[in-house]
């Protein structure tokens, strides 16, 4: 089903919220669209987090929080492979998290993986093992999608004010920057710098020297340089930090008389001088810095100082809301007809001048076709209907580029656009359906999805059927067609005499039968 890349974590847990009796795990649940208990799991490069909440009338009440130090990014070797040791730490963590989501229905849980999983070439090795443990799919999201969800979490946690906010989130492998106003992000960026990856690069042995710190600081400044102008151009009224790194630095400064928990430039300078005197992460004894954060503290400090200097900040306040809270609000929106993915596709259709009436006709026919064969082709999960609906809506966006190979143009646009709300794998699958909606079906590309590739081919066949059915655009009444599927066989039964009276459609389907034989589908029309 859409969004099936998976992942794992490490030992050493802590609770940020109240411990509750988990009797809800055995409670009966309502339908997926009406459930009140939802959960989000953030598989970060440094830490894994799970949040379980009760959703009621647009509000979320946190019932349980749990986090574990993972430093997954530290388990990526020079060939960008996750080590078996880091994988096992992850699986051990997921076993504990699984207890909190046991019994929650499909759609009530959303699990997202971030930079470490974006980078790891062998991330798919986690798929089956993690799926067995969690029982829910895991999405690997893009950096900009991560930024959108972070801002969603921050904006719903802080007071609703009219001014613009700059939000920075220093993660283990990447740092996200967002400028937004109220609940709407105006700019979203993600940079390849994080407290774990920078620790591996500049402070691997735990030694801290001015020269090493300067290297880390300079590397961060160079990264920020690529977005500096865009950030300054939009401007902001307040700066917010949403990561554990910024929270820890703020607490250390507060404990030493620099502010009330916020981060300020004067305090950063003091921390740096103190760090140089200590010279080793093992000697870090700042109040507010937990032992398990000492190793990554110098890297986090260097990145934050670079942010302050590049953006000319004087102060940054911390916000507890972050990615996992954003995932919860996004999940709740999907179940209350506020799905950001639908807005994204509507914007895409408008931008590329899609024929909305034709798209609606194709979508309706494709979904009707799916209803008829869903059970026999094992496409009952609602995610397949979602994916087919999306593909029907945007299958013609490539026409705005050129008619020649427009299906390839459309696939490229979808795969490489910044589509808010979509996981990377969702985009890849959507692009593949658009690529395969006419002429040759790229069987090898479908094979990249393993066993899921067969089901994607079947979805593609249904999309092609709907498009051919409405090849002649118009609102004329179309006949009722009965579809039957059995393994590789698909039969379409038209009313007697209709095909003979509509020879263009008859010719279209005859040619389609030839195309489908190339992917092992036996298509017969009568």
Image (cartoon, rainbow, N blue to C red):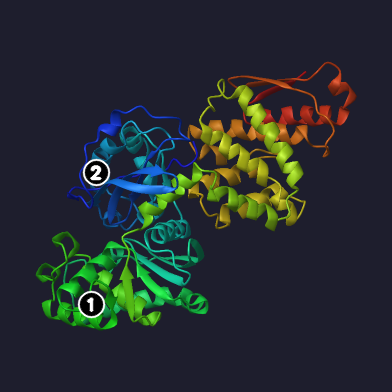
Residue at the top extreme? 496
Q: Is residue 437 left or right of residue 142?
A: right
| Nearest to the observer: residue 318 or residue 388 | 318
Nearest the viewer among 30 and 474 is 30
Foreground pick, 439 / 111: 111
At horizontal 53% and vertical 47% (from top left) the residue drawn is 339
Q: Position of residue 362 (x, y in %)?
A: 71, 37
Neighbours of disc 1 within 10 Å: few (<14), some (14-19), many (20+): some
Residue at image point 48% right, 67% down: 180
- Residue 134 appears in the picture as rendered: yes
- Distance, label 2 to label 1, CA atoms, is 36 Å
As drawn, the residue found furthest toward the right would be 501
- Residue position for label 1: 259
Looking at the picture, how far across and down is residue 110, in whole percent? 40, 43
Which x, y percent locates residue 190? 43, 64
Q: Earlier in the sequence, mark 2 or mark 1?
A: 2
Q: Nearer the viewer, mark 2 or mark 1?
A: 1
Residue 93: mark in rendering: 2
Residue 203 makes an appearance in the image = no
Query: Quick check: 196 above or below 388?
Result: below
Q: Mark 2: give few (<14), some (14-19) or many (20+) Cα within 10 Å.
A: many
Side of 286 relative to 388 (left or right): left
Q: Secondary structure at mark 2?
A: helix
Q: Position of residue 167 (x, y in %)?
A: 40, 68
Name the side, left or right, on which 332 lies relative to 320: right
Extreme front residue here? 57
Q: Say the numbered circle drawn on residue 471.
A: none
């Amino acid at each position: 089903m859409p969004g099936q890349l998976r992942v794992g974590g490490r030992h050493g847990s802590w609770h940020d919220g109240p411990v509750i009796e988990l009797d809800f795990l055995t409670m009966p649940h309502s339908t997926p669209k009406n459930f009140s208990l939802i959960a989000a799991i953030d598989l970060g490069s440094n830490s894994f987090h799970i949040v379980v909440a009760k959703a009621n009338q647009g509000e979320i009440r946190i019932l349980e929080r749990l986090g574990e130090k993972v430093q997954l990014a530290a388990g990526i070797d020079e060939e960008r492979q996750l080590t078996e040791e880091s994988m096992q730490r992850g699986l051990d963590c997921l076993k504990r998290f699984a207890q909190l989501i046991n019994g929650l229905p499909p759609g009530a849980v959303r699990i997202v993986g971030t930079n470490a999983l974006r980078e790891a070439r062998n991330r798919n090795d986690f798929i089956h093992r993690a799926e067995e443990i969690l029982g829910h799919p895991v999405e690997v999201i893009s950096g900009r999608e991560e930024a959108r969800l972070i801002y969603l979490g921050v904006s719903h946690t802080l007071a609703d004010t009219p001014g613009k906010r700059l939000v920075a989130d220093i993660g283990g492998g990447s740092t996200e920057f967002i400028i937004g106003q109220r609940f709407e992000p105006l700019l979203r960026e993600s940079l390849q710098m994080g407290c774990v990856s920078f620790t591996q690069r500049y402070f691997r042995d735990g030694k801290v020297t001015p020269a090493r710190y300067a290297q880390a600081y300079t590397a961060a400044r160079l990264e920020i340089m690529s977005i500096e102008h865009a950030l300054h151009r939009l401007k902001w009224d307040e700066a917010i930090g949403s990561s554990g790194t910024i929270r820890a630095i703020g607490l250390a400064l507060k404990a030493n008389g620099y502010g009330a928990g916020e981060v300020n430039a004067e305090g950063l300078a003091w921390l740096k001088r103190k760090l140089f005197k200590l010279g080793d992460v093992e000697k870090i004894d700042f109040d507010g810095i937990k032992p398990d954060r000492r190793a990554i503290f110098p890297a986090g400090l260097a990145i934050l100082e670079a942010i302050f200097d590049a953006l000319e900040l004087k102060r940054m306040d911390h916000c507890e809301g972050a990615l996992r809270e954003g995932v919860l609000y996004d999940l709740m929106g999907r179940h209350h007809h506020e799905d950001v993915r639908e807005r994204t596709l509507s914007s895409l259709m408008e931008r590329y001048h899609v024929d909305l009436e034709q798209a609606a006709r194709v979508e309706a026919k494709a979904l009707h076709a799916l209803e008829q064969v869903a059970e026999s082709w094992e496409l009952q999960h609602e995610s397949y209907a979602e994916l087919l609906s999306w593909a029907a809506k945007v299958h013609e966006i490539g026409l705005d580029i050129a008619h020649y190979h427009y299906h390839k143009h459309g696939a490229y646009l979808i795969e490489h656009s910044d589509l808010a709300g979509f996981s990377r794998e969702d985009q890849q699958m959507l692009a593949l359906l658009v690529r395969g909606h006419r002429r040759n079906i790229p069987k090898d590309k479908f094979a990249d999805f393993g066993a899921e590739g067969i089901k994607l081919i079947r979805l593609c066949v249904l999309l092609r059927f709907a498009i051919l059915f409405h090849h002649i655009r118009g609102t004329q009444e179309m006949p009722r067609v009965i579809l039957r599927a059995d393994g590789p066989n698909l039969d379409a039964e038209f009313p007697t005499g209709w095909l003979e009276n509509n020879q263009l459609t008859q010719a279209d389907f005859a040619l389609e039968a030839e195309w489908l034989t190339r992917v092992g589908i036996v298509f017969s029309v009568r």
